[in-house]
Amino acid sequence: MPPQNLLISFTFSFFSPIFQDGPQRKKRKSEAAEVDKQLDILAIGTAVGSILLYSTVKGELQSKLDGGHDNRINCVRWHQDNYCLYSCSEDKHIVEWNTQTCKVKCKWKGDNSSVSSLCISPDGKMLLSAGRTIKLWDLETKEVYRHFTGHATSVSSLMFTTVKPMNENKSFDGITGLYFLSGAIHDRLLSVWQIRSDRKEKNAVMSFTVTDEPTFIDLTVSEVKEEPVKLAVVCRDGQLHLFEHILNGYCKKPLTSNCTIQIATPGNDGDSTPKPVPILAAAFCTDKQSLLLVYGNTLQPIIERVSLNTSESHICLIRDVQKVLALKTDVAVTKVKTPVVNSDTKVLVPGIPGHSAAVKTPSSGKEKNKSKRKPGETEVSIEERLGALDIDVSKVKTPGGLPQTDSFAVLLVQGLESNDSDILNKVLNTRKETLIKNTVARMPIHAVIPLLQYLFNIISSASQMVRWLKCVFTLHASYLSTLPDLIPQLGMLYQLMESRVKTLQKLSRLNGRLFLLVTQVAASETVQDVTEVNQTAKLVYEDGKCCMLGVAQLLSSRDS
C-alpha cells in the first residue's frame, strides 16, 4: 500500500446493519460467506482521488478504485447492499462504485463547493450529502429531495439519529419524520434536523452545545418513541460530552451535556500537579450502557471500556499513562567513527606551515558535571535567579527590525492568558492594517472572546482599537455567529455605539457653525490686509472734450 497516497486523516466505514420490520429469510451458505467476506473490507480514501479496499483479515490490499475523483477524498460510505460504495471529494462530485468490478456505477455533481460528508438513510434509498449546505438525494433518480441550510462553515459530520418516525399513527415512507445530526468545522453547536413532508426545513429543530470543535461523534440510534438518543462528542480540547435526550419536536434553547468526562494523570514522581490526558475518540458498545474510550497519544493510543454514569455532571478519570505515552526513539546508526587520538599527538593545520593544534577528544558523556561554585562563594538567591531569567521584550530584535506576524499572535495570546497589560499595549498599539489583519487571522479560536472583552474595556479611551474590532468581526464572523450568548457579551459595545450616535448630530451642527465662524473671521482679516486703491481718475471728459491734464497724465504714465 503506497503510504504517500494515504490521507493524513482517512475516513472509513464498515457495512451498516440492515433494519427490517418482518422476519428475515435464511441465507444460503454461499451468500453468508460473501457477506462475511465483505464485512472485513476497509475502504480508505486517498489524497490523489483513489480509494483503497483493504482486507483486515488477510492484512493486504485487495483492490483499488480509480477514475472517479481527481482530488482528495473527503468521505466514504458503504451501502447496505453488497458491493456498493459511495464517496465524495474536493472535486464537488459524488460517485457510486461497484466494488466487484472496481468501476464507477454513477457520478453526479453534489455541490457548488467541495462535498465533505455523506450519510445513507436507514432504508438505503436516500443519501445525505453536505458541503456548505445539506442535500437529501433520491438514489434512484439522483435528484435532490430536500435542502437544509444553517451552518456557516463546511459540514464535517452527518448521521441519522432515528430509524422510525416518532409519530407512529402516520404511514411511513422510509424517510419522512426521521431526525439526523450535523456538525460543522469551527462550530461548537451540533444541529438536529427533521425531514418533514411540508418542506419546511429552514431551521434545525434543536442543537447541542459543546466546549470546542467536535472531532469525533458517536450515537445510539433511537428505534422507538420512548427511547432517548445517546450522543458522545469528543472535542478538540480533549473532553468527552455525553447527551441523552428524547427527540420530540422543536427545542428553542441549545441543550447542554448531561455529563462531561476528562482524563488526567495522578501527578506522581515528585510532581503533584495532575496533567490532562486528551480523549481521542469514544464509541458506544452494543449494550448501550458502556463506552469504549481511546485516549493518550495518537501513535500509541490506549483503549478502555468504561460504564456509563450520567448521574454526575462531571467525571475525571485518573489514569497513569506516563510510561505508556513515552515513545521510544531508536538511536540512529552511523558508520562514522571518531578516531582515538593520543593527548601527546599534534596535528598540523593546512595552510599555515609549522602551525599545530591539539585535537580535543570527545567527552564520553558519563562524567558528571562538577559544580562551578567555589567553596567560599555565597549561593545565588532565588530572586536573583528569577531576575536573570526575566526577558525584556523591547530588547529582543528580529532580523527584519519589527516583530513578525507569528510573534505578534503569540505575544497577544500570552498577554491575554496572563492578563499582562504591558504586552497587550505593545501589540495593540500598532497601526499597520496588514499586520493587524494577519495577527488576528493567526490567532487561535479560544482567544477570540478574551480579546473582544479586553477591547471592549479599553475602546472608550483608545479609539485606535476600532481597527482590531473590525478585523476580529470580519475574520471570525463564522465562529462568533455560533455563540449563543454573543449578544449579552456585545452589550457594552452596543451602549458605546448608541451614545456616540446620539451625540453625532449635535457635534455635526457644532462643527458646521464653527466652520462658518472661522470662514467669516478669515474673510474679514483678508479684507483688512488689502491695500487701498487710488481712486483718482486717469481721464476726465467734460462736454465731449478731453481734458488736457488727463491726457498729459495718461501719456506720462505710459512713458514711465
Image (cartoon, grey):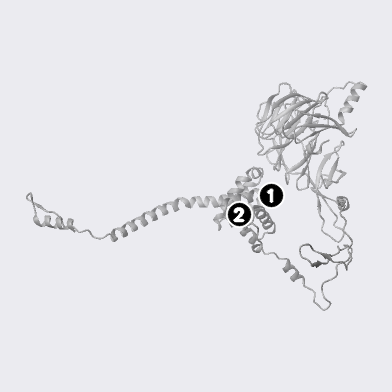
Label 1 sits on a secondary structure element that is: loop
Residue 399 percent coordinates (x, y):
65, 57
Label 2 sits on a secondary structure element that is: helix
| Quadrant of the image occupied by residue 424 | bottom right
Residue 464 percent coordinates (x, y):
55, 55
Q: Amino acid at mark 1?
A: Pro
| Quadrant of the image occupied by residue 88 | top right
| Quadrant of the image occupied by residue 162 | top right
Residue 286 appears in the figure: yes
**Of the residues under marks 2 and 1, which one precedes in the sequence?**
1
Position of residue 20 in the picture relative to residue 202 (left or right): right
Residue 487 percent coordinates (x, y):
62, 46
Q: Between marks 2 and 1, how big is the CA–CA gap?
A: 17 Å
Position of residue 317 in the picture relative to residue 425 (left or right): right
Q: Amino acid at mark 2?
A: Leu
Q: Are marks 2 and 1 in contact (CB under 8 Å)?
A: no
Residue pointed to by mark 2: 455
